[in-house]
Image (spheres, rainbow, N blue to C red):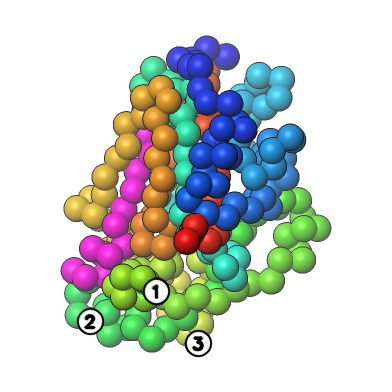
């Protein structure tokens, strides 16, 4: 598999650099953890034999917030670029502060004070690809506010997302589905978005509680796209 491969930071340095910002945890998808340093996840579109991995390539290709299927999702995520294809493969971000602040009053009225259920891969129902069927069965759905108040800034941000949100609590299935679709259609508007166009060695750290992100795809499938990722669950004092 070809691609623009670079002399990236060693995985241990990515972990050590990330630890300066706070506390890391291991990701639930064991197959994508680094064997020696499990706090670092390898995000790649190829398997251990260098062949195209459709599951790996398909991770993060829908708008989402990391770990909302957990009761205590990560506060921030860090990506370090290891190998970048010749074209495509950007990471898109969408500002959920802006999405809430400019939301139509009628939609705000429907979502304020409501809660939503979250599950790994949510309505897509394919989380077993990452963690296995048995592990997925043991994972309980978790509940978060549809609109979350940031504990430091006090600002409101949309906290449901198309990838991991399962349903709006207290609504019949069809009404829940319609409301989720309306929220997600509003939040995916281009005016809320910005793209990271990756270059070799780029490292990006973002606030997970107020932003969606997405792996754009659109790169040649025979080219390697690879990142090291960490997630911060508590910030350093």
Tell whether position 97 is magenta: yes
> Depth-wise, is mark 2 or mark 1 nearer the camera?
1
Q: How far is the residue under mark 3 from the one under mark 2?
A: 19 Å
Residue at image mark 3: 170
| Inter-mark Cα distance, 2 to 1 | 26 Å
| Residue 124 is at least partly visible in this image | no
Mark 3 and mark 2 in contact? Answer it, CB < 8 Å.
Answer: no
Numbered tag placed on residue 151 in the rendering: 1
- In the image, residue 86 sits, relative to residue 195, either above or below, namely above
Choose the circle earlier in sequence order: 2 or 1.
2
Give x and y (percent) for residue 158. Answer: 35, 69
Q: Residue at x 26, y 70 (%)?
A: 100
**Label 2 residue SS:** helix
Binning the other alpha carbons within 10 Å of mark 2 as few (below 14), some (14 to 19) or many (20 upward) gives few
Q: Residues within 10 Å of mark 1 (few under 14, many from 20)?
A: few
The magenta span reads 90-102
> With respect to residue 200, does 72 lie above or below?
below
Q: Which residue is mark 2?
A: 106
């Amino acid at each position: 598999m070809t691609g623009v491969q670079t002399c990236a930071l060693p995985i241990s340095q990515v972990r050590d650099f990330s630890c300066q910002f706070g506390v890391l945890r291991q990701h639930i998808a064991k197959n994508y953890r680094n064997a020696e340093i499990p706090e670092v996840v390898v995000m790649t579109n190829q398997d251990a034999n260098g062949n195209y991995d459709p599951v790996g390539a398909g991770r993060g290709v829908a708008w989402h917030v990391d770990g909302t299927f957990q009761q205590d999702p990560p506060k921030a995520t860090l990506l370090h670029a290891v190998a970048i294809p010749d074209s495509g493969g950007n990471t898109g971000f969408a500002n959920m502060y802006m999405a809430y602040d400019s939301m139509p009053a009628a939609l705000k009225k429907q979502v304020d004070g409501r809660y939503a259920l979250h599950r790994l891969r949510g309505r897509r129902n394919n989380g077993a690809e990452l963690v296995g069927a048995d592990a997925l069965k043991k994972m309980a759905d978790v509940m978060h506010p549809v609109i979350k108040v940031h504990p430091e800034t006090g600002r409101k941000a949309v906290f449901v997302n198309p990838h991991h949100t399962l349903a709006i609590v207290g609504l019949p299935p069809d009404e829940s589905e319609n409301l989720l679709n309306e929220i997600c259609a509003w939040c995916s508007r281009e005016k809320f978005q910005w793209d990271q166009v990756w270059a070799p060695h780029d490292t990006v750290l973002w606030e997970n509680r107020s932003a969606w992100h997405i792996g754009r795809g659109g790169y040649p499938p025979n080219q390697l796209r690879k990142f090291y990722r960490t997630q911060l669950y508590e910030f350093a004092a």
